[in-house]
Image (cartoon, grey):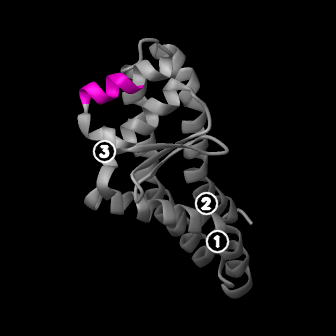
Amino acid sequence: MHRIQERAQAYLEDDPGIAGTRIVKIPEGGVFDIMADRIGLSSADPDVLAHEAEHSRTLRGGGGFYGDVLNLSKTMTEFGNIAALPVILGMRAFIDDPDTRKNVLKTLAGVTALAALPNILEEGRASVRAATRSPATMDSVSTLLPAFGEHALEGALAPALLLAGTKL
């Protein structure tokens, strides 16, 4: 049996409710679609399947309040990343007092960092659970760590830009 089949079977035995979660082929990466209760995979990597299955275990059926928090976190993070530079430029154009500008930018940096936190924590939780369930924990960590780093950097982008804007 292939490694991915073994991991899928282990998840089915541990959580029979996951049997209703569809798995589809996607062009790149891995994703759990909360609304469609679907795991998208670009490869047959058992660690990526395990990571997405961990999301499914928690968020299946929309995830309730927790799913709503994660969706809001993702939306706010995306918006913050898009808006950070225009906000910095707008502050320079419309707020003359450098102390007021700095305080507003620091506050926005804090808000965007807090907004990103739920998604970063969920990604970390899913990666840790997937790795600890793996027969080769350290190999799984080395597979999952780059994607976690990408999520963390995405969450840190707006706060970093806004803090950098305080120096302009």
Residue at the (69%, 87%) spot, across then down: 94
- Answer whether labels 1 and 3 touch (C-beta < 8 Å): no
Residue indicated by mark 1: 83
Question: Disc 2 to disc 1, how far (Cα)?
Answer: 8 Å
Q: Locate residue 97, reporting x and y percent.
A: 65, 82
- Magenta stretch holds residue 12: yes
Query: Which residue lies most toward the bottom here?
Result: 94
Judged left or right of residue 47, residue 58 is left
Residue at the (61%, 40%) spot, across then down: 29
Residue indicated by mark 2: 158
* Start-end of magenta stretch: 8-14
* Nearer-the-camera pick, 150 or 40: 40
- Is residue 14 positioned above or below 163 on the image? above
Residue at the (55%, 74%) spot, across then down: 104
Q: Locate residue 2, reporting x and y percent.
A: 50, 16
What is the number of the mark on residue 58? Answer: 3
- Answer whether labels 2 and 1 touch (C-beta < 8 Å): yes
